[in-house]
Amino acid sequence: MTRTGEVRDGAATAVAGVDFGSDSVRALVIDPRDGTELALAFAEYPRWRDQQYCRPGEQLFRQHPLDHLEALERCFAAVAEQLGPQAVGALAIDATASTVAPVDRAGRPLALLAAHKDDPDAMFWLWKDHTATAEAAAVNEALVGADPDHTRYQGEYSSEWWWAKILRGVVVAPWLRREAWSWMEHSDWVTALLTGAQRPEQTIRNSCSAGHKALYNRRLGGPVPRAALARVDPYLGAVGETLLWPPRPAGSFAGRLTPEWASRLQLSPGTVVGVGSIDAHAGAVGAGIAAGTLVKVMGTSTVDLFLADYAQLKDADLRSLCGFAEDSIVPGLLGGESGQAAFGDLFAWFARLVMSFGADGDGSSRQTVGSVLARLEEEAAQRSDDGIVGLDWLNGRRYPEPNDRARAAFVGLGIGHDAADLYRAVVIAAVMGSKAIFEGLTAAGLGLERMVLVGGVARKSRFVCQLMADALGLDAMVARDSEVCAKGAAIYAAVAAGVHASVPTAQAALCPSFEVDYRPSAEGRTSMGRAFRRYQAAASVFEGPWDGDRQ
């Protein structure tokens, strides 16, 4: 099979998955017949690395579109060095969501215009930008009161999502009402740019983002009605009218590379481009998600992913536990998404606290977050439960019962406790947050029978993985591929190019089989059951009074 970048007889010579993460982009090139890795390239976002357009104390996180474009070109330059030019016959991208930017009538993010090149409000609003809390509440109130209620399958509207960020944009920067003709999700924008269909009314919306973040649902009539959006702000209704509906699932054909982008990426203009997706959803596909499988992405936050259909839901109201969207993750099914707003961030936060007081004993600069975490984990794994109870809401609570204002707490501290004791409590709090979600899902009858763990925490921490297996009572496998999001995007690309007939067919050929790495133990399940009862007791105390003071 020659690597000419062509697609012949439904077979791409090589396919690429392009994963735009929070800090960098990576491109994974695989053989679409058996999944063999052919090339892998990374490129970070330099402006983001320097936090040029961010104010963390205000939970404001923005990214310049040039970071994304420049990193994409560097990635494919590296691919060309490894494989030669025109080595890829198809590609698909995934990206964080909702990561949105205001665009003009031509679909250009406003930060690419000279007048707004350094204005954070004209850039991409990263998924973890939480400045739109008040706006999310306003959107939620309007939609819950509408008929139909478009929160029916997604739950309380989040400050991380599409409509809330758009509303926040025009509240803090009124000039956007004039100059922002529409807004685009990052995953849709890159796909549109590569295929030359960048005008908002031409841009294909992917089902993952459109359903989970913008609340598109065929059963409820499609997009949120303009009248419901206009009750919040007429501008939202106007933006809704600029969008192309219905969305299309990942794995669909979006177009082919424009001559310009074929040249910039050193690929052929015939290169197939698939419809985009949310990064975690692509990761679930790359990890081999199927019916009955919980894919748990354990990184800075967690994303829990699973599959269902309307018959399984039986009209149950699950909006406090998760969201479901049509043709999300795997086309033809409902993709379920839940998770925690902080997970690995909890561990890194605690390590930084320890580092600020000289964790190496001499206050030297040799220590890193990773080295401190390794030492804390080694010691914490040897400790027994000793009464400290923690809540994991350091960055609010995504699920269950979404609440951006919820905050973490630790009780039961004694003068004899040290850093390792408290770190163990931090880890158990994070695991209990996962268990709170899982208990609700299983009580609703979703039938989750096994678990695939994905992400940096899963690969690095045996301590956390074993606690997770014990807490949820599930056999767990750590995903074999380190770049599962890019792998999932490559699977979508292979389907879009016609190499495989469907996503499940492609997974069967390209994903590793399930092998158990962690099994729950009787002792561990007893210990985690006791920890969960304490967690629930603490949650009942701190949820009301502390949050009530902020109302």
Image: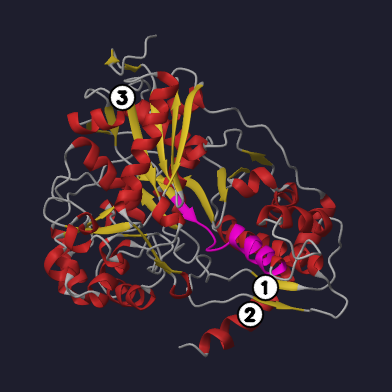
Q: Magenta segment, which residues?
A: 336-354
Q: Which residue is mark 1?
A: 536
Q: Of 260 and 134, which appears nearest the observer?
A: 260
Callout 2, which amino acid?
A: Ser
**Nearer the observer, 327 or 425:** 425
Percent across and percent down for residue 35 are 49, 23
Above or below for 223 versus 542: above
Quarter location, residue 256: top left
Cα–Cα gap, marks 3 and 1: 49 Å
Q: In the picture provided, is 259 more to the left or to the right than 36? A: left
Q: Earlier in the sequence, mark 3 or mark 1?
A: 3
Q: Are marks 2 and 1 in contact (CB under 8 Å)?
A: yes
- Badge 1 local density, few (<14 within 10 Å), some, or many (20+)? some
Residue 6 on image: x %, y %? 28, 17
Is 350 inside the magenta-drawn segment?
Answer: yes
SS for callout 2: helix
Residue at point 46%, 33% (across, down) = 41
Residue 333 visible: yes
Residue beneath disc 2: 540
Residue topped by disc 3: 497
- Amino acid residing under circle 3: Ala
- Badge 2: how crowded within 10 Å, few (<14), some, or many (20+)? few
- C-alpha separation, residue under disc 2 versus residue under disc 1: 6 Å
**Between 252 and 50, which is closer to the camera in this rendering?**
50
